[in-house]
Amino acid sequence: MLYKSRSFTVSSAEGHGAVKVSIIGIGKLGASIAAAIASCGSQVVCVDVNQNQIDMLNAGLAPVQEPSLPETISAHRANLRATSDYRDAIHNSEVTFVFVPTPSDAHGAFTIQNVAKAFEEIGRALATKNRYHLVALGSTVLPGSTRFGLLPILERTSGKVCGKDFGLCYNPEFVALGSVIHDFLNPDMVMIGEFDTRSGAGLEEWWHHHLQTNTSIRRMSLENAELAKIAANNYLTVKITFANMLAELCQQMPGGNVDVVTNALGLDRRIGSRFLTGGLGYGGPCFPRDTAAMGFLSRLLRTPSGPIDAVADFNRGMPKRVVRQISSVLRPGARVAVLGLSYKPMTPEIVESQSIALALEVIAAGCRVCAYDPLAGGRAKTELGNLIEIAVSIPQCLEGAEFVLVTTADPAFRSLTAADFSGAANPVTVLDFWRMLDPELRGYTHINYIPYGSNLDGEANTGILARYWEASAAGRETGYSLLSSADVTTRFEGG
């Protein structure tokens, strides 16, 4: 099959006539996406300012840590090279994808200074190129950034006109660290924000050649695509936070079990089961800053941001709430083991990690913390110094621990058995936020196993609810509108 457009031609035969691609930025996303594109048969030239990363990629090595990246680079090394020369990259490619950081400022807005510098260099290279070239921005930005902040830079530095001499799209990726290559090649959908029809059609054609599945492609304006990217992550934070709220409710409800509740909810096609597992809050380099950016955008455009602000507040306060919940069994001076330091399994990334935030709260409560993570230990050691003892193995982490927090659902922790906790002199309490060791650790005298989001003290909580509804049946004030939740608890516990 042959896809044609006014800009370039793509052959579906791997490696024959395939569009040559340049990637600006070979960090966490760019390097993996470059390798994924190379695996489809395209020649890919990468540009970065970091000479060490350039040298590593040219040597066939992964410049960043990401599952399957080393193997993919090694297998398709002939299709990959890196340089610091923008002119080389632009003149030897037909499509350029830009993946450079857009850090958040003090107000929560995404800054575009790094992208602007890249666009200046792209523009200078385009000034000496006599063929049509398509530029696609993949970095997360606020609505209006591409059209009003970046397009003028391309036109000024190139001396050319967008739509006539070059194309421009906003093409965000919906990928997750730990599975970037797979997610890029198997997306749920592809979203293209287009400056004009020619730009959008050219990028859609490119995607048809590289997709490994029959994926829907949606084309829209630049601004709608910019908003949709941020909105997707914000919606997921709402869903995660809702599940975490259910987990906290289930802990206080007789027989409560968050998995029973969310599994039922997930069968409703309007809701779905993904991202509906109660546990620790969200973190990482995207979700927290995307909620902050949505709040900033709402304030900028004078629209309400209450729901997103509430989600961020709930998520931010979770580590403190957890420590309050377990304070009765956290003996000052006790050794606490934390299994998990990254913000999620299968990544070394610790930005906005709830595991680390929880560990620091435990230290603030007067306990000693030893932590282990298969991938993030080194980075956590560099970041935290001597605040937390970083173990090199699970047994070392568990040695002498009175309390164990299983904070990520890492595969390394799923194989734990009761025997792994048998070395403690006294019974050890294990709080499992993802309930992955249930029922493996139940029923042992030396283990007090607490599956987060499940109620193990039905009698006490039955008493609260029973007294509340007994008062209601007797016609006394139930506190629906007059009493805060704290007042209700105090009143019907006999306070």
Image: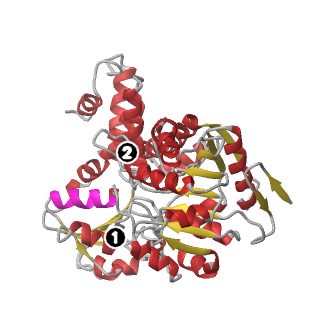
Structural crowding at the residue carrying mark 2, measured as other residues with C-alpha within 10 Å and reported as few (<14), some (14–19) or many (≥20)? some
Q: Which residue is mark 2?
A: 111
Q: Which residue is mark 1?
A: 447
Is residue 208 visible to the viewer in this orientation of the structure? yes
Residue type at tag 1: Ile
Is residue 179 visible to the viewer in this orientation of the structure? no
User: x and y percent of residue 457 in the render?
Assistant: 35, 51
Q: Residue at x 49, y 51 (%)?
A: 139
Looking at this view, is 22 or 176 the one in front? Answer: 22
Residue type at tag 2: Thr
* Magenta highlight range: 355-365
User: x and y percent of residue 369 in the render?
Assistant: 22, 68
> Where is the N terminus found, in terms of image quarters?
bottom right
> Where is the C terminus found, in terms of image quarters?
top left
Looking at this view, is 342 or 94 the one in front? Answer: 94
The earlier-in-sequence mark between 2 and 1 is 2
- The chief SS type of the magenta part is helix
Q: Is residue 310 above or below residue 189?
A: above
Secondary structure under tag 2 reads: loop
Secondary structure under tag 1 reads: strand
User: x and y percent of residue 267 in the render?
Assistant: 64, 45
Query: How far apart in space, not on screen, are marks 2 and 1 (Cα)?
Result: 49 Å
Q: Quadrant of residue 433?
A: bottom left
Q: Residue at x 59, y 66 (%)?
A: 181
Q: Is residue 451 above or below residue 194?
A: below
Residue 317: assigned label: none
Q: Is residue 356 magenta?
A: yes
User: x and y percent of residue 180 in the render?
Assistant: 55, 63
